[in-house]
């Protein structure tokens, strides 16, 4: 009993999400010797509080929140943070493997001196060796690139018909809606076309937006435009990316774009940015891609625009009522491409995010808080 009690007073890391089990850090003798590990899969808020009651003798110094964090129980709210068995006195940090952080009572965390960190790979904070910079931006941009190609070429629609007919000629004829030979470019009331030379507007130009701009310009030969509140001075002049201010003057310029890609965060200012008024100014050939947050699209306005054939294509990786996918969007397979919020879901990101999170936890528990941690520190 004494041995158990002594072990419980070792610094303990609570895992509420599964880490990368092959992690070098997680499996190192130093890590195992230094920390206790508790694992808990969230079910309900009440069950989590009961778990805390049973483990209140443990010195929980850090929580590894992974990707889903506390979403399943409605977020980490003040009533949980101030619950009698929550480890407020020992808890130094909570570390996410994702960039997004929804459902956190940041004021309560701040009041109790609990640090919250998210994932970032745009700056090297010297946490791990061989950091792959901009990995998330690269991988999300790849996903956006696929959606854009879907909008121009409709490959998935062709694949669906090819599987149904098991005949290349029949699949192309069916896509064209006619008998006899079909070249393959006809898709009923629209045509497959090349993105080369077309204009793409990127809303937001952070890591994802910049990675996407490079891929679209040099890979697909598109003309790049971007939209922010202020012009980005870090863009080399030879890139020839055209700036547009994110304000009411944008409406008059929207008609020229064949593709618009959203890489903005979800904030009160960006909620329903893509609304009826915005879409009214867009080309009927528009390919609209959302890689930002679901709330940026006004769902009714987008649904109406799609069903009336007023835009060419909608591609989305994020949804308004996640994890639910809108039935209308899911059913319009010829006009939409959907991915289940997996823009950054690669082995590379999963492994690197775990190593960064564990290294961050070790640094904070040991008191080695660095000056450059501001890039990933939320509170």
Image: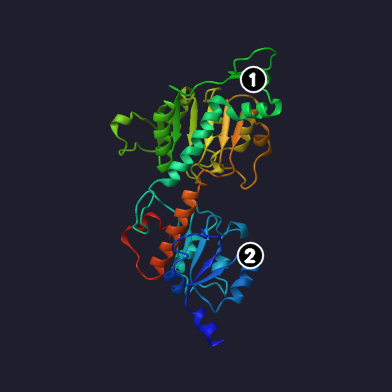
Instruction: Name the spot of residue 280 as percent of width and height, x first.
Output: 55, 26
With respect to residue 245, does 126 lie above or below? below
Residue 186: numbered disc: none
> Which residue lies at the image location 41% right of the left edge and 25% below the top edge?
221
With respect to residue 161, does 345 lie above or below? below
Residue 78, quarter of picture: bottom right
* Classed neighbour count for the residue bearing mark 2: other residues with Cα under 10 Å, few (<14), some (14–19), many (≥20): some
Instruction: Name the spot of residue 300 as percent of width and height, x first.
Output: 63, 35
- Which is nearer the N-term, disc 2 or disc 1? 2
Which one is in front, 245 or 138? 138
Q: Residue furthest bottom?
A: 2
> Which residue in the structure is indicated by mark 1?
172
Q: How is the image coloured?
A: rainbow
Q: Is residue 279 visible?
A: no
> Which residue in the structure is indicated by mark 2?
45
Left/right placement of residue 60 relative to residue 231 reads: right
> Which residue lies at the image location 47% right of the left edge and 50% below the top edge?
349
């Amino acid at each position: 009993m004494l041995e158990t009690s002594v072990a419980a007073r070792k610094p303990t890391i609570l895992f509420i999400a599964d880490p990368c089990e092959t992690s070098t850090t997680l499996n190192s003798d130093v890590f195992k010797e230094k920390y206790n590990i508790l694992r808990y899969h969230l079910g309900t808020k009440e069950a989590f509080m009961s778990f805390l009651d049973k483990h209140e003798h443990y010195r929980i110094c850090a929580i590894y929140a992974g990707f889903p964090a506390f979403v399943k129980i409605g977020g980490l709210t003040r009533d949980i943070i101030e619950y009698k068995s929550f480890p407020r006195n020992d808890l130094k940090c909570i570390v996410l493997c994702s960039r997004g952080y929804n459902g956190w009572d940041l004021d309560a965390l701040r009041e109790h001196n609990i640090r919250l960190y998210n994932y970032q790979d745009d700056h090297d904070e010297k946490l791990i060796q061989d950091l792959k910079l901009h990995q998330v931006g690269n991988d999300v941009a790849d996903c956006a690139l696929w959606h854009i190609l879907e909008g121009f070429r409709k490959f998935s629609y062709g694949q669906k018909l090819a599987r149904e007919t098991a005949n290349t000629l029949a699949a192309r004829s069916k896509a064209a809606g006619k008998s006899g030979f079909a070249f393959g470019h006809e898709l009923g009331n629209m045509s497959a076309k090349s993105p080369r030379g077309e204009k793409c507007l990127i809303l937001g130009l952070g890591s994802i937006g910049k990675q996407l701009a490079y891929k679209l310009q040099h890979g697909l030969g598109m003309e790049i435009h971007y939209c922010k509140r202020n012009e980005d001075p870090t863009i080399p002049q030879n890139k020839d990316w055209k700036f547009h201010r994110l304000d009411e003057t944008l409406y008059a310029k929207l008609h020229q774009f064949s593709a618009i890609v959203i890489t903005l965060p979800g904030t009160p200012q960006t909620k329903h940015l893509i609304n009826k008024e915005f879409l009214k100014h867009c080309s009927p050939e528009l390919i609209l891609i959302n890689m930002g947050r679901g709330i940026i699209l006004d769902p009714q306005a987008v649904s109406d625009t799609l069903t009336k054939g007023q835009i060419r294509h909608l591609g989305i990786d994020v949804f308004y009522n996640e994890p639910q996918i809108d039935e209308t969007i899911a059913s319009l397979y010829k006009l939409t491409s959907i991915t289940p919020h997996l823009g950054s879901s690669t082995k590379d990101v999963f492994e690197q995010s775990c190593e960064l999170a564990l290294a961050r936890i070790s640094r904070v528990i040991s008191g080695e808080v660095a000056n450059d941690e501001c890039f990933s520190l939320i509170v």
